[in-house]
Amino acid sequence: MNVLVCVKRVPETGGRVTLSSDAREIDTRYLGFTVSPHEECATEEAVRLIEANGGSSTVLTLGPEAASDQLRAAMAIGIDRAILLETDGQDWDPVSTSVAIVDAIRAEAAAGVSYDLLLFGNEAADSGDFQVAIRVALALGLPCINGVKSLAVKDGVATARREAGGGWEVFEVPLPAVLAVREGINLPRYPSVPGRLRAKKKEIERSVPVARLVGAMGPAAGPEKIRLRLPAETEGRVEILGTGAEAAPAVVDLLERIGVLAR
Amino acid sequence: MIITFVEHDGGRADRSSLEALTFARRLASGLGDSLGAVLFGPEAAAAAAGLGAYGVTEAHLVDDSRLDAYAPAAWGRSLAGLVGTTSPAIVLAAGTDRGQEVLAYAAAMLDTPMAANCIEVRPGEPFEVTRQRWGGSLLEEARLDGAVRFLTIAEHATQPEEAVAPSTVRVAAFSPTLSEADLRVRVVARVAPEVGKVSLADARVVVGGGRGVGGAEAFSELEELAGLLHGAVGVSRVVTSAGWRPHSQQVGQTGTRIAPDIYIACGISGAIQHIVGCKAAKTILAINTDREAPIMSRAAYAVIGDLHSVVPALSAEIRRRQAS
Ligand SMILES: Cc1cc2nc3c(=O)[nH]c(=O)nc-3n(C[C@H](O)[C@H](O)[C@H](O)COP(=O)(O)OP(=O)(O)OC[C@H]3O[C@@H](n4cnc5c(N)ncnc54)[C@H](O)[C@@H]3O)c2cc1C
């Protein structure tokens, strides 16, 4: 079985976000980078599928040279190969991103590598476009299931569940298929020291994707980012009800006031 | 026309679809355009009848029994077909799982872009939207092209509001053209929600625990408090990543969005990805040893101190009052 997992490098933001001076990016001078938790889980799922079924796993990203770090992080937990579709670091819109991924998968097929499963995160952590997996699946003529939080693969059929209204919806598709995965499908392992060392030495296969220009060649791409903006904050002043256990009566008074204390 | 994809249950439109319809009606009236809806499933006619209150004048009921169970690609194909026959200027949906999915399929099938989780639309040329990134902790102004504009409306960003004057809904059946490939992905079974359990998304009280809880065992203190308040326990990602609690309890960008009357956040620093999941809470009470933690700028109330002494003291105080 061959599994491809697609990930995106994003800044690891914490308590507060500041923007670059042109307001087109997050100011990342003091930040580390990561991938979405959904994609960490997709990567873990790929490793488990290969451990259980044999075969090979590949991680792919569209991003700058620095995204090699995220590819190596995936190889450190057991992904076999890594492909970097190298950009100049500008954010690509979801239409252009999916076209580049489809081109890369077709190039793999031409070189004799076909995939039984294409795994994605349900949505990228930063842009949250909710569509790349679907566009890739349609272009390749494959079935696609989104929001997957539980997966079983047996006899060439994937059974996937996703949360719906407090319960679950169950889907079944024959392979090859595309799955967009959510955090919670598994608990990703931590990389081991030997895993990290191995990943450091591994080769990253690179190519330069062809951008699909908005408005130019054929159908439209986008949405096209103009600028970023922080939402208006409603930062009130916090009222300190007390310190330590002595604060309990004041807190319970508050619970009574807002009417959540059952009698 | 503006077409809205309307989700419904038991013959009534879902709240998030009513939010999207409210958004769409304002957009339509600004453009001097009419408001249409598209509905799937056996109860579509009943749900459509109620949409006049929201200003819908035309409801398209997709008529194909193969689509009674949810089938994302086939629903998307049907919407794309309807767009072909009705030529709307804008197609929108709520930013729910199905809303994002059905619009993404239809947009992709028509080789058109789609903007997810919009909160503002500035129609015209260029056509611009403001949309949520990072689960809503950051906004993006973007240009959206296409002969038809496809967009979803962020949940909880608009209050559902009926039209001043209700309209008469003209109902039309639409028969889609589907291929076998469109029907490959279908819901084949459903698992009903557990009965009698307070769901995190709907709980009126949520007691949250983060790294400060320190381990799996200490969650019994939070469980006790949540139980006394008939609430649910929610947690930060640090807690689920450590395996202390299941992911179904995670609050935040990649977890559940909660909207309780009060969120009691214990040992949680208040990272933006956590805050986007709990900012709909009416009141936030933070219990933290660190007076400078980011959560303090989001909380209305705080107790400074070790949660391991504060939380049991709260439970004891509630018990004492309930007994008296
Ligand atoms: C793309 C992405 C998505 C993410 N999605 C989510 C998400 O959905 N949900 C989520 O929660 N996080 C998410 N995160 C992670 C997030 O950025 C933070 O790392 C996480 O929320 C921090 O959890 P925490 O507050 O429990 O831990 P910390 O940030 O370590 O904070 C612990 C807090 O506990 C306090 N404390 C310690 N001991 C005690 C004590 N004894 N009593 C009282 N207080 C004490 C400390 O002062 C501190 O404020 C995401 C991150 C990324 C990059």
Image (spheres, helix red, strand yellow):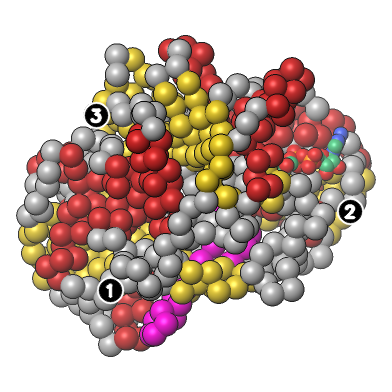
Mark-to-mark CA distance, 2 and 3: 50 Å
Q: Chain of mark 2?
A: B
Q: Residue A29, image x and y in percent?
A: 80, 58
Q: Is residue B291 left or right of residue B165?
A: right
Residue ID at (31%, 68%): A218
Corner quadrant of residue B283? bottom right
Ligand 1, seen in the image, is in the quarter at: top right
Q: Which mark is residue B197?
A: none
Residue ID at (74%, 23%): A197
Q: Residues within 10 Å of mark 2 (few under 14, many from 20)?
A: few
Q: Residue B38, image x and y in percent?
A: 21, 61
Task: Give the amino acid type for the residue marked by disc 2 in the picture.
Answer: Glu
Q: Is residue B71 left or right of residue B240?
A: left
Q: Mark 2 or mark 3: which comes first in sequence? A: 3
Disc 1 is placed on an element classified as: loop
Disc 3 is placed on an element classified as: strand
* Residue B91 seen in the figure: yes
* Residue mark closest to the camera, 1 vs 2: 1
Residue ID at (18%, 39%): B181
Q: Let me know if residue A2 is in the magenta part.
A: no
State the residue position of label 1: B147
Please identify the quadrant where the C terminus of chain A is shown. top right
In front of the other: B43 or A41: A41
In front of the other: A219 or A11: A219
State the residue position of label 3: B188
* Residue B234 seen in the figure: no
CB-based contact (under 8 Å), mark 2 and mark 3: no
Residue ID at (42%, 23%): A2
Q: Is residue A106 left or right of residue A57?
A: left
* Disc 1 Cβ-to-ligand 1 distance below 8 Å: no
